[in-house]
Image (cartoon, rainbow, N blue to C red):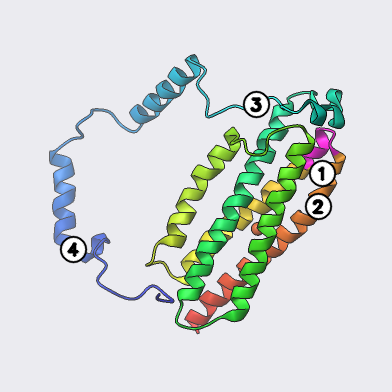
Amino acid sequence: MTTSAPLGLNKTGAQMSPEDTKRQIEATEQFGPDVPGDVTRITEERIKFIREHEAIDEQIGSVPPPGSVKGVLKTGLDKMMGKNPELLLDKLGERLAYERTGVRLYEAFIAKVMAAPDARPELLGKLREIQVEEAEHMLLLKKSIETLGADPTTMTPCAHVSGTMAQGIIQVLTDPRTNMAQCLNAMLTIELADNAAWELLIELARQANHPNIASSFEEPMRREEEHLATIKTLLRDELKVQLS
Ligand SMILES: [Fe+2]
């Protein structure tokens, strides 16, 4: 694994071949696009596509009603069935999926660190610590969803979307060609989003009249702030070493 991007024969820039660039520009003047029109056409097509799906009420998924009556009663039916209770369940499901994915992302990152020529036991220890905390957060979310009488194994719509978003990150981490700084940058994206999401989830739980759930999320929030600070520092150190 290289530590930094090496100097090499990268031919993607136009400056690499001024003659070809000139010919390419000439070609764009000579041959118009296959489909007439400008960028507004694709926007129109996308709007049409969205409306077609709206017309048949097709969405990315749904939130099932809580299945456990016991759970619902325990929570307080009035509170649980307040305005839009599915929103909180959707967001809890999203967080659970994200934290579960986080455990796997850290595992992929740990493999990257272990494959590096220089042994970094301290860094590995720190990453394992964060990974354990991501797993703990996942279990806390499982418990919270269960106290609302819902099924924590449900892939809620927001959980589905967050899984799609994580695909790019996992590709970066498992690509054997990516270096440490590139992987740390990917993890920074994850931790930044994680921080903002926990903050919002606490607010939503409070607003949805679930103060106990909200306060149980304060400790994970603090941990996530530490994760973010750790990844930021690691990335900064990694890049500064390359510059010095
Ligand atoms: Fe985290």
Q: Position of residue 144 (x, y in %)?
A: 76, 41
Given the image, on which type of amino acid does mark 2 rest?
Glu
Whether label 4 lies within 8 Å of ligand 1 gets the answer no
Which residue in the structure is indicated by mark 3?
64
Above or below — where is 99 with respect to 124? above
Residue 31 shown left or right of residue 230 in the figure: left
Numbered tag placed on residue 181 in the rendering: none
> Quick one: label 2 or label 4, which is nearer the N terminus?
4
> Quick one: label 2 or label 3, which is nearer the N terminus?
3
Label 3: state its secondary structure. loop
Q: Give how far apart the Cα atoms at labels 1 and 2 are.
A: 7 Å
Which residue in the structure is indicated by mark 1?
214
> Quick one: label 1 or label 3, which is nearer the N terminus?
3
Mark 1 and mark 2 residues within 8 Å of each other at the beta carbon: yes
Which residue in the structure is indicated by mark 2?
218
The residue nearer to you, when weighing 186 against 139, is 139
Label 2: state its secondary structure. helix
Q: Position of residue 81 (x, y in %)?
A: 79, 23
Above or below — where is 244 with respect to 211? below
Residue 211 shown left or right of residue 14 in the figure: right
Given the image, on which type of amino acid does mark 3 rest?
Pro
* Quadrant showing the N terminus: bottom left
Q: Residue at x 70, y 58 (%)?
A: 224
Between disc 2 and disc 4, the foreground one is: 2
Between disc 1 and disc 3, the foreground one is: 3
Q: In this picture, which residue range is highlighted in magenta?
A: 203-210
Q: Dot 1, how many residues are within 10 Å of its Cα: few (below 14), some (14-19), or many (20+)?
A: many
Q: Give how far apart the Cα atoms at labels 4 and 3 are.
A: 58 Å
